[in-house]
Amino acid sequence: AQSVSQHNHHVILSEAASLELGCNYSYGGTVNLFWYVQYPGQHLQLLLKYFSGDPLVKGIKGFEAEFIKSKFSFNLRKPSVQWSDTAEYFCAVITHTGRRALTFGSGTRLQVQP
Amino acid sequence: GAVVSQHPSRVICKSGTSVKIECRSLDFQATTMFWYRQFPKQSLMLMATSNEGSKATYEQGVEKDKFLINHASLTLSTLTVTSAHPEDSSFYICSAIGLAGGFRPDTQYFGPGTRLTVL
Protein backbone atom coordinates (compact mmCIF):
# COMPACT_ATOMS: atom_id res chain seq x y z
CA ALA A 1 0.00 0.00 0.00
CA GLN A 2 1.12 3.53 -0.63
CA SER A 3 2.38 5.73 2.16
CA VAL A 4 3.39 9.35 2.57
CA SER A 5 6.18 10.57 4.82
CA GLN A 6 6.64 14.05 6.14
CA HIS A 7 9.91 14.20 8.01
CA ASN A 8 9.50 17.61 9.59
CA HIS A 9 6.96 17.36 12.36
CA HIS A 10 7.35 20.84 13.79
CA VAL A 11 9.09 23.75 12.12
CA ILE A 12 9.66 27.15 13.69
CA LEU A 13 10.72 30.04 11.49
CA SER A 14 10.99 33.77 11.71
CA GLU A 15 9.05 35.96 9.32
CA ALA A 16 10.73 36.41 5.93
CA ALA A 17 12.64 33.14 6.29
CA SER A 18 12.46 30.63 3.48
CA LEU A 19 10.49 27.44 3.91
CA GLU A 20 10.90 23.95 2.58
CA LEU A 21 8.80 21.07 3.88
CA GLY A 22 9.70 17.57 2.82
CA CYS A 23 7.29 15.01 1.46
CA ASN A 24 8.13 11.56 0.15
CA TYR A 25 5.75 8.90 -1.02
CA SER A 26 6.12 5.22 -1.62
CA TYR A 27 4.33 4.00 -4.73
CA GLY A 28 5.81 2.89 -8.00
CA GLY A 29 3.00 3.90 -10.32
CA THR A 30 1.36 7.11 -11.42
CA VAL A 31 0.32 9.46 -8.66
CA ASN A 32 -1.45 12.73 -8.12
CA LEU A 33 0.11 14.82 -5.38
CA PHE A 34 -1.36 17.46 -3.13
CA TRP A 35 -0.47 19.84 -0.37
CA TYR A 36 -3.20 20.91 2.00
CA VAL A 37 -3.08 23.51 4.75
CA GLN A 38 -5.14 23.55 7.93
CA TYR A 39 -5.18 26.89 9.73
CA PRO A 40 -6.02 26.82 13.43
CA GLY A 41 -9.69 26.07 13.87
CA GLN A 42 -10.35 25.86 10.15
CA HIS A 43 -10.88 23.11 7.63
CA LEU A 44 -8.40 21.73 5.16
CA GLN A 45 -7.69 23.90 2.16
CA LEU A 46 -5.92 22.91 -1.01
CA LEU A 47 -2.63 24.74 -1.50
CA LEU A 48 -1.57 23.13 -4.74
CA LYS A 49 -1.70 19.92 -6.68
CA TYR A 50 0.25 18.04 -9.30
CA PHE A 51 -1.47 15.89 -11.89
CA SER A 52 0.90 15.96 -14.85
CA GLY A 53 3.07 18.27 -16.91
CA ASP A 54 5.47 20.81 -15.45
CA PRO A 55 6.84 19.28 -12.24
CA LEU A 56 7.15 22.72 -10.65
CA VAL A 57 3.69 23.61 -9.44
CA LYS A 58 2.64 26.99 -8.17
CA GLY A 59 -0.19 27.27 -5.70
CA ILE A 60 -1.98 29.88 -3.68
CA LYS A 61 -0.38 32.33 -1.26
CA GLY A 62 3.04 32.15 -2.88
CA PHE A 63 3.61 28.44 -2.27
CA GLU A 64 5.14 26.13 -4.80
CA ALA A 65 6.14 22.48 -4.91
CA GLU A 66 8.40 20.44 -7.10
CA PHE A 67 7.68 16.87 -8.11
CA ILE A 68 10.88 14.87 -8.47
CA LYS A 69 9.83 11.48 -9.72
CA SER A 70 13.24 9.87 -9.27
CA LYS A 71 13.23 10.81 -5.61
CA PHE A 72 9.53 10.12 -5.02
CA SER A 73 9.37 13.58 -3.52
CA PHE A 74 7.03 16.56 -3.61
CA ASN A 75 8.56 19.20 -1.36
CA LEU A 76 6.70 22.39 -0.54
CA ARG A 77 8.50 25.72 -0.69
CA LYS A 78 7.91 29.37 -0.02
CA PRO A 79 10.66 31.96 -0.36
CA SER A 80 9.47 34.22 2.44
CA VAL A 81 7.00 33.11 5.09
CA GLN A 82 4.59 35.34 6.97
CA TRP A 83 3.11 35.05 10.42
CA SER A 84 -0.20 34.18 8.76
CA ASP A 85 1.36 31.01 7.34
CA THR A 86 1.29 29.46 10.80
CA ALA A 87 -0.69 26.28 10.26
CA GLU A 88 -0.54 22.53 9.82
CA TYR A 89 0.56 21.35 6.39
CA PHE A 90 -0.34 17.96 4.96
CA CYS A 91 1.08 16.24 1.93
CA ALA A 92 -1.24 13.73 0.27
CA VAL A 93 -1.28 11.37 -2.66
CA ILE A 94 -3.83 9.62 -4.85
CA THR A 95 -2.61 6.62 -6.79
CA HIS A 96 -4.07 5.57 -10.09
CA THR A 97 -5.41 2.30 -8.82
CA GLY A 98 -9.06 3.22 -8.98
CA ARG A 99 -9.16 4.07 -5.31
CA ARG A 100 -9.65 7.79 -5.21
CA ALA A 101 -9.15 8.42 -1.54
CA LEU A 102 -6.26 10.52 -0.36
CA THR A 103 -3.44 9.06 1.65
CA PHE A 104 -2.11 11.73 3.96
CA GLY A 105 1.25 12.28 5.53
CA SER A 106 1.44 12.87 9.25
CA GLY A 107 1.53 16.62 8.83
CA THR A 108 4.00 19.38 9.65
CA ARG A 109 3.18 22.06 12.12
CA LEU A 110 4.66 25.37 10.97
CA GLN A 111 5.03 28.15 13.48
CA VAL A 112 6.11 31.52 12.15
CA GLN A 113 7.33 33.98 14.72
CA PRO A 114 6.87 37.70 14.07
CA GLY B 1 -15.66 27.48 -5.40
CA ALA B 2 -16.88 24.15 -4.13
CA VAL B 3 -18.25 24.19 -0.62
CA VAL B 4 -18.77 21.24 1.67
CA SER B 5 -20.56 21.67 4.97
CA GLN B 6 -20.78 19.43 8.01
CA HIS B 7 -23.33 19.43 10.76
CA PRO B 8 -22.96 19.58 13.65
CA SER B 9 -19.56 21.19 14.06
CA ARG B 10 -19.30 19.94 17.60
CA VAL B 11 -21.21 17.33 19.56
CA ILE B 12 -20.95 15.95 23.04
CA CYS B 13 -22.82 12.78 23.87
CA LYS B 14 -23.06 10.15 26.55
CA SER B 15 -21.50 6.75 26.16
CA GLY B 16 -23.89 4.29 24.53
CA THR B 17 -25.81 6.81 22.47
CA SER B 18 -25.71 7.26 18.70
CA VAL B 19 -24.62 10.37 16.88
CA LYS B 20 -25.33 11.34 13.28
CA ILE B 21 -23.02 13.64 11.34
CA GLU B 22 -24.12 15.14 8.03
CA CYS B 23 -21.91 16.06 5.13
CA ARG B 24 -23.35 18.18 2.33
CA SER B 25 -21.96 19.46 -0.93
CA LEU B 26 -23.62 22.85 -1.22
CA ASP B 27 -22.96 23.95 -4.78
CA PHE B 28 -22.04 20.80 -6.65
CA GLN B 29 -23.05 17.18 -6.97
CA ALA B 30 -20.72 14.73 -5.31
CA THR B 31 -20.38 11.30 -6.83
CA THR B 32 -18.12 10.17 -4.06
CA MET B 33 -17.70 11.26 -0.47
CA PHE B 34 -15.01 10.19 1.93
CA TRP B 35 -15.03 10.05 5.69
CA TYR B 36 -11.79 10.63 7.57
CA ARG B 37 -10.91 10.58 11.20
CA GLN B 38 -8.24 12.78 12.73
CA PHE B 39 -6.81 12.19 16.17
CA PRO B 40 -5.11 15.08 17.98
CA LYS B 41 -1.79 16.01 16.42
CA GLN B 42 -2.07 13.19 13.92
CA SER B 43 -2.92 12.89 10.29
CA LEU B 44 -6.23 12.11 8.68
CA MET B 45 -7.05 8.43 8.39
CA LEU B 46 -9.55 7.29 5.81
CA MET B 47 -12.48 5.44 7.34
CA ALA B 48 -14.70 4.76 4.35
CA THR B 49 -15.59 5.71 0.81
CA SER B 50 -19.21 6.46 0.05
CA ASN B 51 -20.73 6.40 -3.41
CA GLU B 52 -24.22 7.67 -4.03
CA GLY B 53 -26.77 4.90 -4.13
CA SER B 54 -24.44 2.09 -3.12
CA LYS B 55 -22.93 0.63 0.02
CA ALA B 56 -19.91 2.30 1.50
CA THR B 57 -16.49 0.72 1.27
CA TYR B 58 -14.80 0.58 4.64
CA GLU B 59 -11.08 0.58 5.33
CA GLN B 60 -9.51 -2.31 7.14
CA GLY B 61 -10.08 -2.09 10.86
CA VAL B 62 -13.12 0.17 10.63
CA GLU B 63 -16.27 -1.46 11.98
CA LYS B 64 -19.04 -0.98 9.47
CA ASP B 65 -21.73 -1.80 12.02
CA LYS B 66 -20.41 0.87 14.31
CA PHE B 67 -19.85 3.58 11.74
CA LEU B 68 -22.93 3.55 9.53
CA ILE B 69 -22.62 5.53 6.32
CA ASN B 70 -25.48 6.48 4.08
CA HIS B 71 -25.10 8.36 0.81
CA ALA B 72 -28.71 8.88 -0.15
CA SER B 73 -28.26 11.66 -2.67
CA LEU B 74 -25.58 13.39 -4.71
CA THR B 75 -25.35 16.15 -2.13
CA LEU B 76 -25.65 14.35 1.21
CA SER B 77 -23.79 11.66 3.08
CA THR B 78 -24.28 10.82 6.73
CA LEU B 79 -22.05 9.08 9.25
CA THR B 80 -23.74 7.59 12.28
CA VAL B 81 -21.57 6.54 15.19
CA THR B 82 -23.62 3.89 16.94
CA SER B 83 -23.27 3.07 20.63
CA ALA B 84 -20.52 5.62 20.98
CA HIS B 85 -17.73 5.11 23.48
CA PRO B 86 -15.08 7.51 24.75
CA GLU B 87 -12.50 6.02 22.39
CA ASP B 88 -14.68 7.19 19.49
CA SER B 89 -13.98 10.77 20.50
CA SER B 90 -12.22 12.34 17.55
CA PHE B 91 -12.44 14.86 14.75
CA TYR B 92 -14.44 13.51 11.82
CA ILE B 93 -13.94 15.11 8.43
CA CYS B 94 -15.74 14.45 5.19
CA SER B 95 -14.68 15.29 1.69
CA ALA B 96 -16.39 15.16 -1.65
CA ILE B 97 -15.43 14.68 -5.26
CA GLY B 98 -17.58 16.44 -7.81
CA LEU B 99 -18.97 15.37 -11.11
CA ALA B 100 -16.94 16.45 -14.13
CA GLY B 101 -17.87 19.73 -15.72
CA GLY B 102 -16.96 22.51 -13.34
CA PHE B 103 -14.78 20.78 -10.82
CA ARG B 104 -11.84 18.49 -11.30
CA PRO B 105 -13.07 15.02 -10.45
CA ASP B 106 -9.86 14.14 -8.67
CA THR B 107 -9.84 17.15 -6.41
CA GLN B 108 -11.43 16.61 -3.05
CA TYR B 109 -13.23 19.37 -1.23
CA PHE B 110 -13.21 19.10 2.52
CA GLY B 111 -15.82 19.90 5.09
CA PRO B 112 -14.89 21.83 8.24
CA GLY B 113 -15.06 18.73 10.42
CA THR B 114 -17.09 17.60 13.40
CA ARG B 115 -15.56 17.25 16.81
CA LEU B 116 -17.16 14.38 18.69
CA THR B 117 -16.69 14.02 22.42
CA VAL B 118 -18.11 10.96 24.11
CA LEU B 119 -18.39 11.17 27.87
Image (spheres, coloured by chain):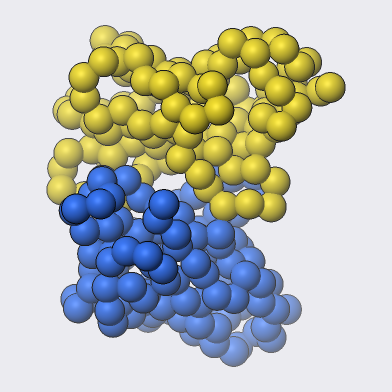
Chain colours: A yellow, B blue
Residue most extreme to the bottom: B17
Q: Residue at x 49, y 49 (%)?
A: B44
**Front-lying residue, A1 or B21:** B21
Left or right of B99 on screen, residue B119: right
Residue B114, percent from left and from top: 58, 67
**Front-lying residue, B85 or B36:** B36
Compared with A28, B66 (above or below) is: below
Residue A78, percent from left and from top: 56, 16
Q: How many marks?
A: 0
Left or right of B23 on screen, residue A8: right
Q: Quadrant of the N terminus of chain A?
A: top left
Name the image quarter holding residue B31: bottom left
Residue A46 in view here: yes
Residue most extreme to the right: A114
Name the image quarter holding residue B12: bottom right
Residue A2 in view here: no
Left or right of B94 on screen, residue A102: left
Q: Residue at x 59, y 11 (%)?
A: A79
Q: Residue at x 21, y 25 (%)?
A: A52
Residue B51, percent from left and from top: 23, 68
Residue B45, percent from left and from top: 45, 52
Left or right of B99 on screen, residue A60: right
Q: Quadrant of the C terminus of chain A?
A: top right
